[in-house]
Image: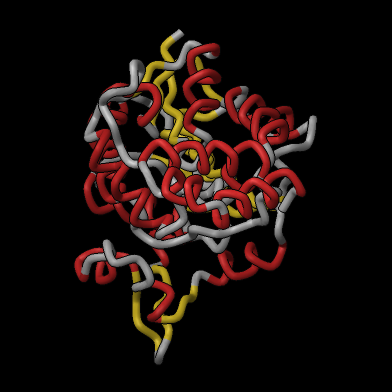
Amino acid sequence: MSIVYGAARQLLKTVPGLRRFADSPSGQALRYRLALHFEDRPGFTFTQFHRLPAQLDALVGPVLDFLEAHRRPDPIRIVVIGCSTGAEPFTVASVLLERRPQLAFAIDAYDIDPDVLAIARGASYSIDTVHANPLVTADFVRSTFEQEGDRLVVRPEIARRVRFEQADALSPDFRLRVSTADIVMAQNVMCNLRRPLARRLFDNIAALLKQRSALFIDGMDLDMRERCTRICGLVPLAYELQRIHDEARLVRGERYPHFATGLEPFSQRHRNHERRYSTIFLRDS
């Protein structure tokens, strides 16, 4: 934690008048802005299976419709950045096989950490890990896993759709090493990075988008997401904005307004609330 941020937090805690202000909605917004700009941002994982069900509904519905997946002669290519232990790419593969069984697709998942990639490639998880997210359903578990003793193992028809590879998404040659994709997912990665690094990562990720493509990007500072997606000419998908946002807040837990990895409450009072709160952006250029 930086000296400036630590001193500001301590001041808000100890001065009576400031403490009352800090507990108000305006004070919470200020505390959150301080966290966004000054917190050191130690790495924190939000890896969970079936993390954002409303986002998955958007994927199998309006996103694939936008990509005209039913007319495509070639498979839909999905790239997942910061895949961690594999929960997101396996979730996506499972949902697509279940709800779009005729769709041809392949998923390439990348992470910098060899230890989490080893877990992902093993495709075997404890029961508690799979059920860590309260939004996980019994139907999802049945369609995604086979039980082997006290472990849940990803079904082979799902596992074979995902390829895991080690890579540093901040590296200058990342965008050259990874070919463009129809769908790029980079979720809950940038919230763990200081803002200059997050902006650099966004540029690398945006370079992977095909001319007609979709970007899934929960977990980026909202003001930065507004600005960067507008500069890149990306259009927010106004599908179940509040539902997706509230599910993301549930995953983040009680971290707002104290930490940069928290997430502010949804509000339509923001002038650009669709761009601010959307986690899915479309490119058509």
Q: Is residue 161 visible?
A: no
By what rule are the colours in the image chosen?
Answer: secondary structure
As displayed, is residue 236 above or below residue 95?
A: above
Which residue is situated farthest in the front direction here?
16
Q: Is residue 75 left or right of residue 266?
A: right
Residue at figure coordinates x 70%, y 59% from the top left:
113
Q: Nearer the viewer, residue 25 or 123?
A: 25
Task: Tally the marks.
Answer: 0
Residue at figure coordinates x 67%, y 41% from the top left:
38
Q: Is residue 196 visible?
A: yes
Residue 271: % across, % down: 34, 16
Residue at figure coordinates x 31%, y 29% from the top left:
63
Residue at figure coordinates x 41%, y 41% from the top left:
105
As displayed, is residue 234 above or below residue 140?
A: above
The quadrant where residue 212 appears: top left
Residue 205: % across, % down: 60, 30
Residue 133: % across, % down: 35, 66
Q: Nearer the viewer, residue 235 or 145?
A: 235
The quadrant where residue 48 appears: bottom left
Q: Nearer the viewer, residue 101 or 260?
A: 260
Which residue is situated farthest in the bottom direction here?
149
Which residue is situated farthest in the top direction here?
285
The quadrant where residue 176 appears: top right
Residue 260: % across, % down: 55, 46
